[in-house]
Image (cartoon, rainbow, N blue to C red):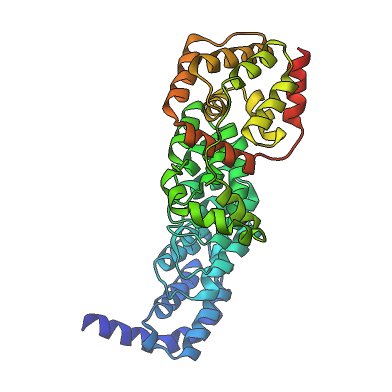
Amino acid sequence: MASERQDLTLRREAKEVLGLVALAQDKAGKARALIVRRLTDIALLPESQLTPQERQLVDQMLAQLVGHIEVDLRARLATRLADRADAPQEVIVTLAHDVISVARPLLEKSTALGDSDLVDVIQAKGRDHWVATSKRKELSSSVTDALIATGESEALIEIARNKGAQFSATGYERIVSLSEKEPALCDLLVARDDITPALAHTMFWWASSGLRLDIVNRFTADRRMLREALNDAIDEGIDAFSSDPELMRTLSMMAPQRRYGPSLGEELLSAARSTDMRKVVSLLAKYADIRPQTAAHIVTDPGGEALAVAAKALGMTRKEFLQFALLIASHRDSTSRTAAEVNRLTALFDSVATDRADVVLRYWDDTVRATKPSIKAAGRMAAA
């Protein structure tokens, strides 16, 4: 009952407030504060208590007054409106574009701000507004697209850890690309439930050693059951999907595991001993059935984890792999690997199944950028 009486009182006061608008031009802060407080009370009345015309008028008055009141009062107004889904639209949009001390509560949690409102703020304002927006409980793909376009590290890290953030396909590819220069992003993105195996394997090339092992183990499916279930259908009908390159690439991962002759390991070792890195890349590309650019990335990768996966996929023995890895490392920097590095690479080689390692090669071949630098790097290794 007390609430109803208060609502009725505020309703009666609405007309009084209309007559006080002229006082907004007065420099007396108390008068302006009184008007804004009364208008805010009225604006927050239940929808049934005001006609649409009255609500629109109050909203317009508040929006006009906002620019004439002190920052601390605007901040209190924004805080009060932040929890209201029915907050005056024109007012909260104006406040969301205000200085960050005013805008922050609205940007972080106001559900009355729509996606287009948030995108407008991101495009019009700067870092503090971007970071505040990134902390919202839920973010649509259009908003994360706008935040990703800013390239702001703190905002990117916030949306990467934000489980309520959604990403468009383009946005996800963009933030994964940006993670190459922002190591903290890699850990956060790999931990997300919605990251795809292809995107995770894209980050393999610049991820830390521990994260690389996580990527290989978590984002590589065992094909055997799927291959057995789809084998006949794929053999008889794969040509029917020739017009869909994306599906063709996915189905190609179900192909039977490649079998390599016993001389393969010795052939690769022989090329590595002769310091002919271009030949090593060529042989690896040929036998693994991957692009030369992918093979070059594997050979020139400084961590050695990529080489461990490739060697396992090719069916090399542990002894062959270790000899191969040590030869490649010596050509790259003229130094041998430490005992700790050897133990780490051996553990990876032993932990990944041959079939899974072969799947990783397919992912890499699909995601490694088709560029020349790695092949040139292989050539420099040969020259050294």
Q: Quadrant of the N terminus?
A: bottom left
Q: Quadrant of the C terminus?
A: top right
Q: Which one is nearer the viewer's eye here, 336 or 312?
A: 312
Q: Which one is nearer the viewer's eye here, 166 or 127?
A: 166
Q: Residue at x 36, y 82 (%)?
A: 46
The relative height of residue 71 versus residue 38 in the rendered view (above or below) is above
Residue 382, image quadrant? top right
Q: Residue at x 55, y 45 (%)?
A: 255
Residue 239, image quadrant? bottom right
Q: Position of residue 158 (x, y in %)?
A: 49, 47
- Residue found at the far left of this picture: 1
The relative height of residue 170 versus residue 274 in the rendered view (above or below) is below
Q: Residue at x 45, y 74 (%)?
A: 87
The relative height of residue 252 versus residue 240 in the rendered view (above or below) is above
Q: Position of residue 306 (x, y in %)?
A: 57, 28
Let me know if residue 37 appears in the view: yes
Q: Which one is nearer the viewer's eye here, 171 or 345?
A: 345
The answer to whether residue 182 is left or right of residue 291 is left
Q: Which one is nearer the viewer's eye here, 156 or 48?
A: 156
Q: Position of residue 44 (x, y in %)?
A: 40, 77
Q: Residue at x 60, y 38 (%)?
A: 364
Q: Position of residue 332 (x, y in %)?
A: 68, 15
Report how many numbered discs are placed on residues in the image: 0
Let me know if residue 94 appears in the view: no
